Amino acid sequence: LNANGGFAYVGMFWFRFWRFGYWVDVVVDDRLPTEGGHLSFVHSSDRNEFWSALLEKAYAKLVGSYDALRGGTTSEGMEDFTGGMCEMIDLGVSAPENLFNIMNRAHSRCSLLACSIDANPSEIEADGPLGLIKGHAYSITDVRTFRERGGKHIQMVRLRNPWGNDREWSGPWSDKSEEWSRISPEERMRIGLTFENDGEFWMAFEDFKRYFSRLEMCHLSPEFENVETKGGGKKRKWEMTRHEGEWLRNSTAGGCLNNRDTFHMNPQIRVSVVDADEDDDDPTGTIVVGLLQKGMREKRQDPFSIGYCIYPFPKGAPVNALLTKEFFRRTQMAARSIYANTREVCGRHKLMPGDYVIVPSTFQPNEEAKFLLRIFSERPYTASELDDQITCGVDPIAPLPSMPKDEEMIAKLRSAFDAIAGESGDIEAEDLRNILNRVFENKGIHNFTEEAFVFTHILLSHLLINSSILVGESFEGFSLETARSMVALMDVDTSGTLGFEEFQTLWYELRLWLTIFKEADSANAGRLRTYDLRTVLSDTGISISNDIFKAIVCRYAHNGVIVFDDFILLLVRLITVFSKFKENLDNRGGNRATFNVDVVCFNA
């Protein structure tokens, strides 16, 4: 503070920007880039005015550099300065039939409206029809219906040229045109009509649609509480929800609907359209959906082509489970956006009240980015991301094959096992690995029998193994880590070894897991595609959440596939974790378990 009690100038300026769902404070000093004694970038016509250059510096700091500010669209700036969501609508013959109602409702909810006339690069800010300017942004300051003296109503739009001079519309309803004689003094007073060379003018709505090419609307989020509405009436706000997510390679980046095998892997957002719009005879409700990809400008990376599809949510389907590949193959979508390589794709959709699921995606699969999905509506609604519940030991979706266990085969298996285990009657992890590798690499699946299994182990020291037909071409045997995990799963007496009963149980489980794996591995390559993993796990009675699935793909998959050894290691570890969890469930019920440090260390 200075001597007068005010703040002394210290050359520091504080700005606040909206950044992907959050407000971020940016502080800069008063040092600005110059060249030849002039500001290098944004500047005012008044050489003593610096707020625009300081704002630009703070914005550049936010995104990383001045160079990162190159290119982009006006909607990016409107969103980053207001936190709103921008919607673009083509005018002319492409304009929606209810455009005036859309604009009127948006304006009543304090949305920022702007428009422009398309122009070639050589025509930017060139003279257009009837005083309008091509390639120039106009703001829309009012949307109203006038009542003429004869009782006829006419739809009108008020616009402003930011130059603030006499460059205004000169057609019908321009300043002091003869059309105004049809409006009574009372009606003029109601709309606050003035005629000045201030860049502001009225146009008939039909002329507005005819002469302008594009409308941009920036819908402010509900957090704006102090925005005045036209006429001083009751403030109305948009209802909004947002969902942050990411597309990960081979996990949640399934690509667009062209990729039938992977599209279902994309995030799925369930939304309820609960009621029809206000003041509308149409029974449908409106939602405005914006899908924004994060951080591309900071990474100097061109944005991916992104978009979304909307499907009706199936009646009776559980709200805590993902929709399957088969659902998307047989169900017709209710709406969709375009796919565009812009920071944000936005669309307006009129839907019958009910439940829907929104699937955001990149156009190509395996393109990684974080995204923000925002949904605006006139009525309150509910929305949430679909996810599978984490379960183990539930009934599998597909019927499991039967595994015969006749006494004669068990006796032969015991004899072979005893021959290998010796006097101790147990085998260690290394022995287990060697046995399983000899067996799983030796015979074709169609010739694999209990007799062959026993015979293989009796003649173990005499076999020369050079084939991997059983599991697949890429199978290189089980690792010692996998063998140790199998021992830990079946070792109920914590001896570090397997007795015959424990080995017998493991063997039948392995045969079952192999059968399920081979059904998904139609190419007999010994690899499981990640987009089939959740279905395969469901066949074994295991259901995992989105976050667990992402972690599994990161740890066990390589280039979108999981080999048989890693698949077995994954299954064994999941079953082990679930077993220990169930052993320590809280008495209070629910999916909570209590572990002391001894249990945690013992199972590490």
Image (cartoon, helix red, strand yellow):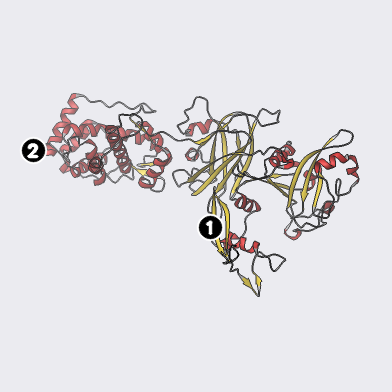
Amino acid type of the residue that numbered disc 2 sits on in the rendered structure: Glu
Residue in front for this viewpoint, 184 or 42: 184
Residue in front for this viewpoint, 521 or 567: 567
Q: Going by the image, does 50 lie left or right of 100?
A: left
| Residue 590 placement (x, y as % from top left) | 36, 30
From the image, which quarter does the N terminus lie in? bottom right
For disc 2, the marked residue is 423
Amino acid type of the residue that numbered disc 1 sits on in the rendered structure: Glu
Looking at this rendering, what residue extends furthest in the left direction?
Answer: 423
Q: Going by the image, does 182 lie left or right of 488?
A: right
10 Å crowding of disc 2: few (<14), some (14-19), many (20+): few
Mark 1 touches mark 2? (CB < 8 Å): no
Q: Going by the image, does 353 lie left or right of 126?
A: left
Tag of residue 298: 1
Q: Secondary structure at mark 1?
A: loop
| Residue 57 placement (x, y as % from top left) | 59, 63
Residue 447 in view in this figure: no
In the depicted structure, whether residue 589 falls above or below residue 562: above
| Residue drawn where x is 38% and y is 28% of the image | 398
Q: Quadrant of residue 515?
A: top left
| Residue drawn where x is 41% and y is 45% of the image | 560
10 Å crowding of disc 1: few (<14), some (14-19), many (20+): some
Q: Earlier in the sequence, mark 1 or mark 2?
A: 1
| Residue 130 placement (x, y as % from top left) | 84, 52
Q: Secondary structure at mark 2?
A: helix
Tag of residue 69: none
| Residue drawn where x is 71% and y is 44% of the image | 90
Label 1, label 2: how far apart the Cα atoms are: 67 Å
From the image, which quarter does the C terminus lie in? top left
Residue in front for this viewpoint, 560 or 235: 235
| Residue 278 placement (x, y as % from top left) | 68, 31
